[in-house]
Image (cartoon, rainbow, N blue to C red):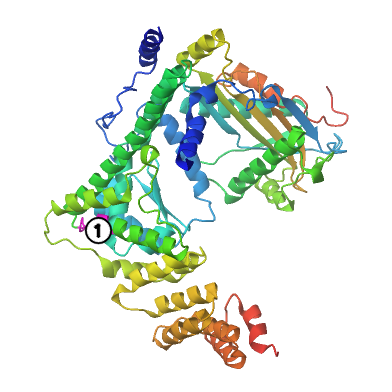
Amino acid sequence: MRKLLFIAALFSVVSPAQAQFDLFGGDNSPLYSSKATATKDGFTFPSTASETKIVIIRPDIFVGEQSTGGIDRLNANWTKTAREYLAAETSKLLISQGFVVKNLQDLEDGGDSLLVEYRALFKLVSNAAIRNDLFPAKGLPTKKGKFNWSLGKGASKLGDLGDGGDYGLFLFSRDSYGLPGRKALEIIGLAKGLEAKPTPHMGYAGLVDLKTGDLVWLNVNVRLGGDVRKPDGAATRIEKLLAKFPKRSGAAK
Amino acid sequence: MLKKLLSGLLALSLTIAPHSVLNSSAKIENAGAVLPSAFGYEPQDEDERGLWLQMDEFEKKLKHSKLLVKDPKLNAYIQRVLCKTVGQERCASTRVYIMRTPYFNASMAPNGMMMVWSGLLLRVRNEAELASVLGHEFGHFENQHSLQSFRDIRAKTDAMAWFSLVPVVGSLAQFSLMGSLFKFNRQMEREADMIALNYMSSNGYDPKAAATIWEQLRGEMDATAKGRKQKSRKDMNGGFFATHPNSKERMEYLKDAAGDKGNAGFRDGAAEYRAALKKWWPRLIDDQIKLNDFGATEFLLEQLASNGWTSDLLFARGELYRARGRSNDFEKAIGFYRKAAAKRDAAPECWRGLGLALMRSGAVDEGKAALRKYLKRKPDADDRAMIGVMARASK
């Protein structure tokens, strides 16, 4: 009996019937139409009188194609070019808002341990913030009504890596474009009244104060527009990801 | 009607998924004429480039992992054994990473990144056994098993997605496809086993060593079960859903195949292996003891001591009994520590263990004296402050 249950459980995990279509309504729930932003209480950039330098950490990017069965294949060319486009568009946008920008994205040999460790730490902390704060259905009791996440003071070392950066900007984006078979399945499924899970186009961006390590701003969007495979699309994507980016006090609009 | 719909869907899924989705005994073949082990090999198509880029990104992070064993001598030794097994030119296409993880495992990524867990190094007893694992992993790499597996999964899940639209019959078809996914994986494991055997015998390593590893692992599973009063898991591996052949089956076909290779002056390199691992054994055994698996650890120590109990092994046995701490365990531990300390190459830690076990068994003064001996022999010990307090404290 236990074995049968095990097989049934495994089957339900692997079987694309559940994976592809929202049969039970449960697992696709609200996240799929959600976007959210949070800013640390009372946060503002220093006045425009002084220079504010933002270090753009090498973006975490996945661009791929989705098969009929929902398997994502990373496309190496798209991923590499999207990373360049997104970093360039981010620089452009921040410079237009009066910031000084430094790109920290040379990681060919793995780069500095510090950068690898802080990228991993940011991912962990920002994901906890997203789960518990931005989509607070499962909020932590001790974090209610507060947005006070931090990578710790050690993050100042990242500022040194970026030649005296004041803030670190982390970007994550994941896109998958449906192959013809996937699209066909979606259409035929729809005709039967089954709605297929949308292919992912989601991302988040977070800003860390490199003096305190505090996460001062976080924006998540799980239905992002903009085709990251093209420069124009990447620009649209960055506009959406940084839509509610804190403004500098007194900065020209 | 249903049948008609089903066959229609089947035809559709076959046109959309070009691979032989329903052929459950899909042939394993090399995708290209050039093997990934060739000098300067570059991934050949979009699938392979995608997998490589993902693994390259992973490898960049891995290089900074805290679990990485960085000892250049040990790394050079493992790389040397791999090169001796598969040949100098081929081995240049792979990078081996030793991970401080106390279980038996090794893995291979499509871009040539191999991971070997430290628990494997503790269990393997000679170079030939190590060569059989390294050769097996190399076989996965050379025959592009990750790539084939990725394509197999994609093709079969594509078909499964179409079947999900068909009630009942679709589920049965999905079920059989799923079984074939696992079967394909088992076939690749078997193929990698055979590749390893060929490399071993053509480069002088005793191919019989491939089967002895499985024999030992089965013995260890029995020992774990006995220690925990459970049923041994040695013959359980999931059946229909098994990703690897059953260990008994594996041991037997490896034994048969090795028999066919004859007996032409093969070596097992046991002495070289022991010498290369000497510095690491105490740490590896310490990791194993901390798993709290008394039966398996005792079994492993006995296996390692098949040529006699060295000071390191006696010390480890003392640590094992002291850690369990049941009645009589401290007395037994004291005996092992004393024997270990009496050997010429005894590590200072023998006196620490002896002192702590004596104190636990009530012989406080004698225990303190042993702790002082430890500190005298190792003045720069990491735990000097703590042990110092214990050695001085009055009741």
Is residue A185 rendered magenta in the image?
A: no
Q: Residue at x 46, y 62 (%)?
A: B229
Q: Residue at x 87, y 31 (%)?
A: A249
Quarter holding residue A125: top right
Q: Residue at x 37, y 32 (%)?
A: B179
Figure disc tally: 1
Instruction: Tell me residue B311's x, y (percent).
Output: 40, 80
Q: Which residue is mark 1?
A: B209
Q: For the residue marked with disc 1, what is the amino acid?
A: Ala
Q: Nearer the viewer, residue B11 or B390?
A: B11
Chain under label 1? Answer: B
Image check: A51 left or right of B200?
right
Q: Nearer the viewer, residue A95 or B240?
A: B240
Which quarter of the figure is the C terminus of chain A placed in? top right
For mark 1, does the 10 Å Cα neighbourhood hold few (<14), some (14 to 19), or many (20 or more) residues? many
Instruction: Tell me residue A108's x, y (percent).
Output: 50, 41
Image check: B310 left or right of A63?
left
Q: Secondary structure at mark 1?
A: helix
Q: Residue at x 64, y 26 (%)?
A: A26
Is any atom of residue B378 visible in this view? no
The range drawn in magenta is: B205-212
Instruction: Tell me residue A178's x, y (percent).
Output: 51, 18
Instruction: Tell me residue B321's x, y (percent).
Output: 49, 76
Q: Is residue B370 above or below residue A219?
A: below
Image check: A227 left or right of B116?
right
Is any atom of residue B205 visible in this view? yes
Q: Nearer the viewer, residue B287 or B250?
A: B250
